[in-house]
Image (tube, rainbow, N blue to C red):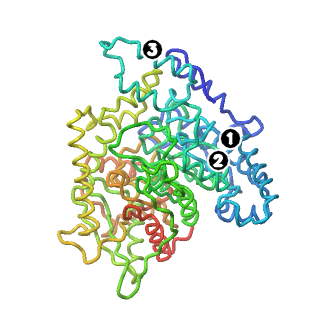
Amino acid sequence: MHTHFQDGDWQAAIERYNVSVALPKELIVPGLDKTRKTLSGNIPNDQPNVAGKSFEQVLSESKSAEATKLRDAIVQGRWTVTQVMEAFLVKAALAQQVLGCYAEIYFDRSLQRAKELDALLTKSKDVAQLGSLFGVPISIKAHLGLEGSGSDRGFVFDVLDQESTDAILTREESKSKDDPSRLTDSTLALLRKQGTHVQTVTGHAISMLLEQGAIIIAKTTMPQSIMQLDTRSNLHGQTLNPRNVHLSPGGSSGGEAASVSSGATLLGVGTDIGGSVRQPAACVGLYGLRPTIGRINNSGTRTTMLGNEGILGTMGPFARSLQDLELLTSVLVKDSTRSDPHLCPPLPWTGFQKPTVDAGKKLNVGVLLDDGFVQPITPIRRAMHDVIEKLQASGKVNIVYVNPADYGERGWWMARQLYFMENGELLRSLASLTGEPLMKLTEYVFSPPVHLHSASDIWLLQYQREAFKKQFWQHVFVNGGGKQALAQPLDVLLCPAAALAAARPQQIYYWGYTSLFNLTDLPGVTFPVAGYAAQAEKDKAFEATKGGKLKPSISDLDQGTIKEYETYREVFENAPIGLQLIGHRFREEELLGTLAMVEDIIGNKK
């Protein structure tokens, strides 16, 4: 599970770690990992990646039931939990070989828990009292707290044994304080506080899953540093998208997205500090929720930015249906104040709350076609256009087109600085302490405007953040992008979940469509638009219409995004399209209920 380290030998440390988490030999299919090995090498920037075959061909019979239906089948005696686990563990082993989505799969642990649940089911006199996730296979992101499991944040440093970790930090502490290479005392203290590879506690939200009978069969991959919308690290290689293996599943919860989308698990739990649940969910055709900070208890998470309150992260659920998303959210939110009342408000989950719509009151939906800084690519704009038309035609929705002003650009530059107010020293040190090189997108997140802030700089930046949140709420939800208040504030805001659909590996730089709502702490849910995907012929036809024309290039990031899609249309073919609904703080039940209504209107049946 963990590995020893010898100075400078980070590659050997990875090899030893991989041996410790290797799949059982009987589940290895020769050649199945060919695509992943190809894409984990050097990825050219000037030509598409075309190696491999689709995941559907490999697992053609792996279409999975919804979690609620699987649970019912188990408690009604159609299958035993052990039978279910054996099947899903095989799926997970296949998914790992094709997609590389797991940090570790818990074969023995999962089967032992399955036997315990089968025994409990046999003794139970009232199956209605069994947990709402009884026997359901779930995956969780690699840094979430599960006692006895390994944890990592995409760095080799994270999987070292305690002896090696202590030796590295002690060596660093022994350097003269005049040595410019020495880490600061505060950075060293934070490294000591970040926890060990083998976790000693189960976080509150994860314990709620276990209380409801879930079986956590695996922990999933994330990128080096977490802070990317791709999933690639020296430790785990490149994770691939099950809907199109030439593309990334997004990030940083890309392993979760790949696992659930592949059907190897039915539900998943990731984290979101800049879009890391919503963007990967959109990339693979799933539902993903980023709740308001505090709605889910984050205890037990091995974070990369301990103590940084510039922008806070939160856990968030992945699911294959809106019904399952609501179910999983209700469990994650359960008793959030039990152990940490200072972290979470006492807000019990109340279930879907669909809006009341009649002749006198329509649903007020704001529409953000683009954020004024980076335009979404054509298939996303095409999906937005058609969804808006259906909402308008329903007679139940009032559409308000929101002028983004300069909030997209300002929000992006502000968020970049808030993530790394100490110039990224803590994350850089996780690589430098082992000699592991920084990856391309890790280096990008540390580039300007990121710099070292003084204490007064931090105060000013956080003051500006709070002012921005108030101004954004007034401009968008109260004024609808105009100069005067609307008669009725917006109920939700409809917008893209990203500027790109699923991106080519290591080719996504802009997070603004999701990080904007981390900055303003507004809950957001992404949903797949049934029947819509990147399709070159349909996209070209849409671009020829009046409503499909792009504006002149807005920024360098905008120009790069457009060029990426136009150059590699054939690689993006059939990439799923997801959109995003943004709601009011702490009103996640209303947000999901509104999405249910929107899906009814647009006929969003997968």
**Residue at image x 64%, y 47%?**
216
Q: Which class describes the residues within 10 Å of circle 1: few (<14), some (14-19), or many (20+)?
A: some
Q: Which class describes the residues within 10 Å of circle 2: few (<14), some (14-19), or many (20+)?
A: many
Q: Amino acid at mark 1?
A: Tyr
Q: Secondary structure at mark 3?
A: helix
Considering only vertical position in the picture, is 582 above or below 504?
Answer: below
**Image coordinates for residue 277, horizontal then vertical, percent:** 47, 51
Task: Report the Cα–Cα distance between label 2 and label 1.
Answer: 8 Å
Report how many numbered discs are placed on residues in the image.
3
Q: Is the N terminus in the top left, top right, bottom left or bottom right quadrant?
A: top right
- 1 or 3: mark nearer the eye: 3
**Image coordinates for residue 132, horizontal then vertical, percent:** 65, 61
Considering only vertical position in the picture, is 423 above or below 354?
Answer: above
**Residue at image x 47%, y 21%?**
434
User: According to the image, label 3 marks what residue?
Assistant: 171
Q: Amino acid at mark 2?
A: Ile
> If you read the primary sequence from the N terminus, does the residue marked by circle 2 or circle 1 appear first?
1
Q: Nearer the viewer, residue 581 or 290?
A: 290
Q: Is the C terminus in the top left, top right, bottom left or bottom right quadrant?
A: bottom right
User: According to the image, label 1 marks what residue?
Assistant: 106
**Image coordinates for residue 70, horizontal then vertical, percent:** 70, 62
User: Which of the numbered marks, if any, corresponds to residue 216?
Assistant: 2
Q: Amino acid at mark 3?
A: Arg
**Image coordinates for residue 64, horizontal then vertical, percent:** 67, 59
Q: Nearer the viewer, residue 122 or 3?
A: 122
**Residue 570 in view (yes/no):** no
**Residue 471 in view (yes/no):** yes
Image-based side of 490 in relation to 331, left or right: left
Q: Secondary structure at mark 1?
A: loop
Whether the residues at callouts 1 and 3 have beta carbons within 8 Å, the answer is no
Residue 179 image-quadrant placement: top left
